[in-house]
Amino acid sequence: MSERRPFREVKLQWLRLLSCDANINDNAKCVALYIVTAHVNGHTEKAWPSYKTIAEANGKSVKSIQRAIRDLEIGGWLSVQRGNGIGHNTEYCPTDASILKASELREKTDKSVPLASSEGGQVCPERRPDVSGKGGQICPPNLEKEKNKKPNAREVRAKAVSRRSIPVVVLPTAQARQVDEWNAWLAEKTLPDLARFNLATSVNGSSGYQLPGRWPPECGSDKEQDCLSYFLSRLPASAHQETAQAAYLEAA
């Protein structure tokens, strides 16, 4: 069984598991996303935002936020210690059970390279003779022959035609709930929010975003890969740098 890791190390896996929980509604998922990304302390793993703060950030009513918190508490995602409102704010903390599940998912996705304990280098694959299973030696590739091969124009055109196209729709910025859903989906994929992409447009005087759909795709669907490719191909240069720096720090 996996050991419980600090929440800051498995935050992405925690959000991924939450987004796939069919028992939690979209409103509660947006509230949880805001709390863990904007307020949870990386060391204490606790947060103390008020209902009013959460409501203003999500564009919801206080009662809606209270229902969402209750759903997250019942669903086993957040541990809530309610305060009296006079110098003692309500305290939120991801539950140990949910962090443990996220740790198990992180362990499955981590890739480790075995090292030779005596020499301190990578373990190289065992050398085998250059003999094929059919008998005879395996001839090395003829580089000159490969160099003279030219691509067939018909094959190039056929590949271009068979490439999967992604239909694009214009989502008005006034559709706050759908915009929040897309931003939550992008955050789950560790990507910037919609405002950071060059997707803004205007139709009949109304501003909006050019997106691969009005709602984010379901987890594990074919459309999810298409949408991910759509945003990765439009990732701004600054976000590329931030992603690279984050990957370097995590590896260090």
Image (spheres, rainbow, N blue to C red):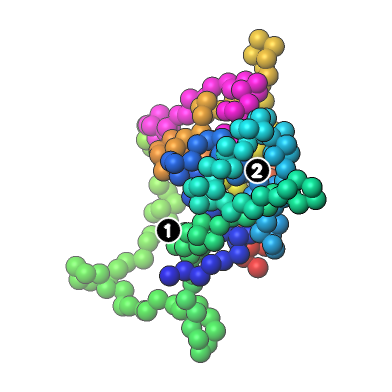
Q: Is residue 91 magenta?
A: no
How far from the left and from the top, in percent, is residue 207?
A: 68, 19
Q: Which mark is residue 26?
A: none
Point out the stretch of residues depicted in magenta: 158-187
Gap in angstroms between the C-alphas marked 2 and 1? 55 Å
With respect to residue 205, does 60 lie above or below?
A: below
- Is there CB contact under 8 Å for labels 2 and 1? no
Q: Amino acid at mark 2?
A: Tyr
Q: Is residue 161 magenta?
A: yes
For residue 244, say whether it is visible: no
Q: Secondary structure at mark 1?
A: helix
- Return the residue found at the far top: 204
Q: Secondary structure at mark 2?
A: helix
How far from the left and from the top, in percent, is residue 241?
A: 70, 50
Q: Assess disc 1: are there few (<14), some (14-19) or many (≥20) residues with their C-alpha within 10 Å of its C-alpha.
A: few
Q: Nearer the viewer, residue 51 or 244?
A: 51
Q: Amino acid at mark 1?
A: Leu
Residue at image location 63% in from the left, 26% down from the top: 176
Per the image, the residue denoted by label 1 is: 143
- Return the residue found at the far right: 87
Residue at image location 67% in from the left, 33% down from the top: 62
How far from the left and from the top, in percent, is residue 98?
A: 51, 56
The label nearer to you, 2 versus 1, is 2
Residue at image location 53% in from the left, 42% down from the top: 71
Q: Which mark is residue 34?
A: 2
Asked if residue 173 lies left or right of residue 135, the reply is right
Residue at image location 40% in from the left, 29% down from the top: 161
Q: Nearer the viewer, residue 208 or 7?
A: 7
